[in-house]
């Protein structure tokens, strides 16, 4: 038996259980708030035991970070070739995620509880595929001549993420359509006329 064919120790993760735990966490955040969304309560709601959760997530904060900031039910948008329209789609998705009851309950608590470098790195890792997709969209637009190559995707992503989060926390779901237009226009202007 070679190393390649040797079975790995332990059981593979059950994606159905993972999803049940994440859904339970989102529901409890929305219904009970951040403080009452404990691992025990999540386990009870998801129909699993607490050790099963800790085998998947090292801490309560890590689980709640994935529940709030992970992909959830929102798929990454596919580029259409119209950068202005694509930016508006990104803004709409970020606003919808940030305005969800789970995010509005979870983000302030996570910000308060996740002040370590480990927590910051974990959050960056959760968001890495989204950041990469956003940067790839801008790269395609630059390669096609729609925007200059000098665009900084990291700065634009931070503006998209931070602005939509603050708007949702401060205003909930109010004025999302108009705000999405205005923010998409601002991001488009930044992409077309990047600061040198």
Image (tube, rainbow, N blue to C red):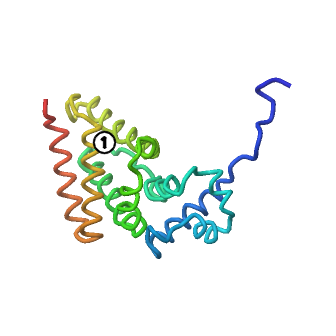
Q: Is residue 48 above or below residue 81?
A: below
Quadrant in the picture for residue 80: top left
Frontmost residue, 7 versus 184: 7
Q: Is residue 22 left or right of residue 3?
A: left
Q: Position of residue 45 (x, y in %)?
A: 61, 71
Q: Is residue 185 left or right of residue 17?
A: left
Quadrant where the image shows the N terminus:
top right
Q: Is residue 64 left or right of residue 12?
A: left
Q: Is residue 134 above or below residue 51?
A: above
Q: Position of residue 51 (x, y in %)?
A: 68, 57
Mark 1, residue position: 81
Q: Is residue 98 above or below residue 154?
A: below
Quadrant in the picture for residue 117: top left
Q: Residue at x 15, y 44 (%)?
A: 189
Q: Position of residue 49 (x, y in %)?
A: 69, 63
Q: Which residue of the protein is positioned furthest toward the right in this rendering? A: 1
Q: Residue at x 13, y 34 (%)?
A: 195
């Amino acid at each position: 038996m070679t190393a390649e064919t040797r079975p790995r120790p332990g059981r593979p993760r059950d994606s159905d259980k993972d999803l049940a735990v994440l859904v339970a966490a989102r529901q409890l955040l929305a219904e009970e708030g951040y403080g009452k969304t404990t691992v025990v309560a999540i386990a009870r709601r998801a129909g699993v035991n607490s050790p099963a959760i800790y085998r998947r997530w090292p801490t309560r904060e890590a689980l709640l970070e994935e529940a709030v900031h992970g992909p959830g039910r929102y798929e990454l948008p596919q580029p259409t070739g119209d950068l202005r329209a694509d930016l508006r789609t990104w803004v709409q998705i970020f606003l919808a995620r940030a305005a969800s009851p789970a995010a509005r309950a979870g983000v302030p608590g996570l910000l308060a509880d996740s002040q370590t470098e480990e927590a910051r790195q974990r959050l960056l890792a959760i968001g890495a595929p989204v950041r990469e997709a956003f940067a790839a969209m801008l790269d395609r637009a630059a390669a096609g001549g729609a925007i200059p190559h000098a665009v900084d995707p990291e700065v634009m992503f931070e503006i998209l993420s931070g602005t939509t989060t603050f708007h949702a926390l401060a205003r909930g779901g109010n004025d999302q359509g108009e705000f999405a237009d205005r923010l998409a226009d601002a991001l488009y202007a930044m992409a077309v006329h990047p600061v040198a």
